[in-house]
Image (cartoon, helix red, strand yellow):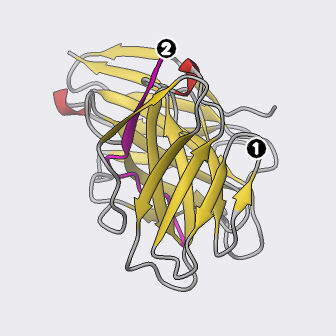
Amino acid sequence: DAKTTQPPSMDCAEGRAANLPCNHSTISGNEYVYWYRQIHSQGPQYIIHGLKNNETNEMASLIITEDRKSSTLILPHATLRDTAVYYCIVTVDKIIFGKGTRLHILP
Amino acid sequence: EPEVTQTPSHQVTQMGQEVILRCVPISNHLYFYWYRQILGQKVEFLVSFYNNEISEKSEIFDDQFSVERPDGSNFTLKIRSTKLEDSAMYFCASSEPTGGYPLANYGYTFGSGTRLTVV
């Protein structure tokens, strides 16, 4: 998705916090930031979304900068099962997937 | 937790044959979607469906594709005359309405996919 920029891959040690960055400098005022992930060839899985405020749920936390031009998805205690491709999506409408970040959790 | 169910999980078909991929969305969801993922590539949007009609479709969704909600529970994707390049994982998704913005408060729930192999 041309609206977002994510690193192609990242590593994180098991048990540590995984911090996945996303740049979306052209985000407009009514667009949300969504995060999904895809484990191997399974269907994509919704993780979290936010507009302006930081958000937290049972899976992750989403930190959005004050200017909304970037965000970070935080998996607080990564496990091997969190190995997946993570997608940051900016939208007011349908979900369009980019290439995402391939997160490797190292034992 | 409610799930989106897709059948079959794997389908092999001969080039030129028609295939129908089936999906049972979550019961109270009103917005439905089909995506596909060619092996090794990104997930691509095909079509969205609301109120018994297509609300948006991509360039991929040409005249060979059609969608239908034949009853209150199923949502189908039909490919009329399959080509080798239609081989892919096909994912169905549904979402819950939030009053004008379907995504405003809830994410899409995706099924596990149907792997279509055209030979």
Q: Which residue is drawn at 58% across and 43% down?
A: B93
Same chain letter for marks 1 and 2: no
Question: Which residues lie in the magenta part?
Answer: A92-107
Residue pointed to by mark 1: B72
Mark 1 vs 2: CB contact within 8 A: no
Residue pointed to by mark 2: A107
Task: Inspect this view and state whether residue B79 appears.
Answer: no
The answer to if A35 sits in the magenta stretch is no
Task: Inspect this view and state whether residue A72 appears.
Answer: yes
Residue B81 vs A100, above or below: the answer is above
Residue B81 x, y percent position in the rendering:
26, 34
Answer with the quarter of the image where residue A80 lies. Answer: top right
- Main SS type for the magenta part? loop
Q: What residue type is labelled 1?
A: Gly
Q: Residue A70 carries which label?
A: none
- Could you give the CA–CA distance between mark 1 and mark 2, rounded to whole angstroms? 46 Å
Residue B15 vs B47, above or below: the answer is above
Q: Nearer the viewer, residue B116 or B74?
A: B116
